[in-house]
Amino acid sequence: MKKMNLANVSRGKFALGLLVATLGLTMAAGPGEVSAAYPTKPIRMLVGFRAGGATDLLGRLVAKGLEKELGVPVVVTNKGGAGGALAYNEVRRARPDGYTLGWVTGSLFTTTNIGNVKWDYKALDSVARIAQWPMVVGTRAKAPWKSWKEFLADAKRNPGKYKFGHAGTGSIGHLMNVAVSSGVKVIMAPVGVRGRFSALLGAKIDLLSAPAAGFVKFSKAGKMRALVVGSAKRVRLLSKAPTAKEIGIDFQVDLMYGVFAPPGTSGGVKGKLRAALTKVVANYKPIHKFAKTKKMNLEYLDGTGLDRWLGEQNATVVRIMKKVGLYKSRMKKN
């Protein structure tokens, strides 16, 4: 019988133990976990809208701020289409390793609930809300209505007379129009994003829903008048316009901007991203300058508070879409 080499046995036991320990750590980490060194390579952020718009520009500023905090490049990729659904779907299918993120707007609620995709807003992991952009309903300064109450009274006397412009069917602006004009008959007119203010100034439409910045600009010039705000609070430079809630209308939806991740992304990764984004929102001056120019509100929120807020926003969108027959309407046509 051959004698056993005790040194070889000891080395074999050590190697086996090291292998078992390594496998144990790998299994414990799970498919969505990454190393504590995250991030170690460039991060891609998908934007579901065209380059050069407010959504894209704010997203790029957030990406630059993240680069500064995380120490790796954050590369923005525009993938427009289907109200942001193409980009959101790619994020949903990406590996949950923290290297693919989505720059998400309030279109997450509209595109999912109208049926552009077969999943709901919970299919993406929320990381943080960065900003909100108040929506406003307004008219030309020369219009006869000084308040929303006056417009409603006129619209009741003249059903079907007035055209109510918005960015597109199923958009947040369209849903706001539906909510605030409940009880009167108006014509909903999808005039798009780029030409909406010129359509109002040119009297092609009588009222318009759009982000606050445009109304602030034209109100200062004496060309427009804000009538209703869809946010939780009034817009400082349009302070005479009440919120929908203040005049008894059950609507409170802002255009959200936030960072989301693929489902299953680890708490550790999201924690690092949140820590970085908190600093970006608090300290990165280019974002503050942009938000001030565009009349956006930097309102950081994450965790359970954000999940609760997302649920409330989604419920409002579902309620209004069901009211006008838009809920899952595009899915039914497919």
Image: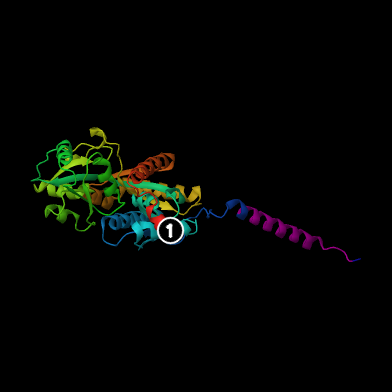
Q: Which residues are magenta?
A: 2-25
User: Which residue lies at the image location 65% right of the left edge and 56% below the top edge?
Assistant: 23
- 210 or 96: nearer the eye? 210
Figure label count? 1
Q: Quadrant of the N terminus?
A: bottom right
- Indicate the position of residue 233 as horizontal and vertical percent values: 25, 37
Tell which residue pokes out farthest to the right in this image: 1
Relative horizontal placement of residue 188, taking residue 321 as reference (left or right):
left
- Indicate the position of residue 59 as horizontal and vertical percent values: 32, 55
Q: Is residue 186 visible?
A: yes
Relative horizontal placement of residue 113, taking residue 197 as reference (left or right):
right
- Say which amino acid is labelled 1: Asn
Q: Quadrant of the C terminus?
A: bottom left
Is 169 covered by the magenta stretch? Answer: no
* Secondary structure state at the residue bearing disc 1: helix
Q: Is residue 116 visible?
A: no
Is 16 covered by the magenta stretch? Answer: yes
Place residue 193 in its image quadrant. bottom left
Residue holding disc 1 = 89
